[in-house]
Image: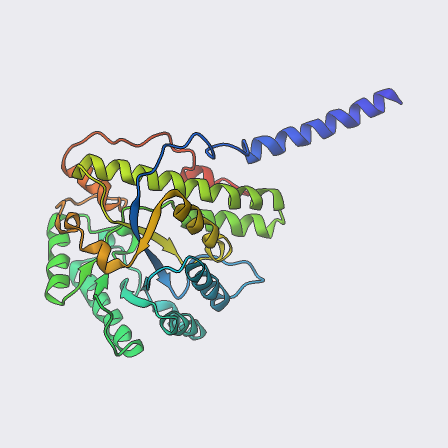
Amino acid sequence: MKRQWVGVLIGIGSVLFCSVVALGDQNEGLDAWEPLDPMEMAITVDDLPAFGEIPPDMNRRDIGKGVLRALESIHTPPVYGFSNAQQLTWAPESLDVLKDWLQSGHFLGNHTFSHVNLAHSTAEAYIADIVAMDGLLTYLSPLAPPVKVFRYPYMSEGDTVEKRDRVRNFLENKGYQVAQVTVHYDDWAWNGAYVRCHAMNDKAQVQWLRQHVIAAARREVRQAQKMAKLVAGRDVRHILLLHVSAFNALTLAEVLSALQADGVKFIDLPRAMNDPIYRLNPGLSLSGGPTFLKQLIEAKNLAYPYGKQLYSIERIEAICKR
């Protein structure tokens, strides 16, 4: 009888050990923070009206409303959502997401019609896709937003300097300003992990994701402030990249509230883009779509000051993989 109980206990212990290994240290990355100086940051949201996979018990409009509630919860100024609307051709009901966004007092920016990667396109085809999206934005919102803004899909500005310059010249001639990115915590990867864990009903892993995405955002904000001081000798007005995803509908209010508690003041995008740093052009053709600050580090040939990545894309994408 004793041997049977010993076997049971060993089995339970093995299961618990595997769970701990899968989840990682629950306190990992959540303490021993470096202080954050007061920071100004604009929120931007990409890929309206729809991004990524969603659980079967959610729909696109509910996700959009969830993100809107998160923005309202911290009383943010009007936020620019960057729309690529090709998906409306096969899911026309997603148009309600864009209408809800505009009716809530936020603005839309151009993210190309088809979410094109400039590194995989000709400049001519890419410009045509910008023009197609521009027409839809004018239809949706006849009153122009305060600033006409464009965001490169995948943050990719092309695989050649010639291509990069040609598109930049087109945008400038059409009155567009480029909305760069200085902060992002790969929220797209966290969404994929959440959808997988939700499908497996792995509540422990979902809780790990909810807890640690806050830590990931806080770490990235601190790293962005470090990089800004390195390349500019001061902090800058930052621009945060998010997506209109199922996981953000669930967790974004907590993430933004934590950043506010750290000393982040949320500002509108035009104010952020008025920072003189955004008038710089790194002039590089870089693969992988690095953030604007990383481009400047590369252009100035500076040592990258980034600390250990606790929340790498590889780590997040491995969660709840069968």
Q: Pinpoint residue 121: horizontal percent, then vertical percent.
A: 22, 57
Considering depth in this image, is 296 or 53 the residue closer to the camera? Answer: 296
Q: Is residue 4 above or below residue 128?
A: above
Residue 321 in which image quadrant: top right
Q: Pinpoint residue 306: horizontal percent, then vertical percent.
A: 30, 32
Residue 322 showing in the rendered view: no
Residue situated furthest right in the rendering: 1
Q: Pinpoint residue 190: horizontal percent, then vertical percent.
A: 46, 47
Q: Is residue 105 above or below residue 177?
A: below
Q: Pinpoint residue 47: horizontal percent, then vertical percent.
A: 36, 61
Q: Quadrant of the N terminus?
A: top right
Considering depth in this image, is 144 or 203 the residue closer to the camera? Answer: 144
Count of marks placed on residues: 0
Name the residue at 28% across, 59% down: 268
Q: Quadrant of the C terminus?
A: top right
Q: Is residue 75 above or below residue 275?
A: below
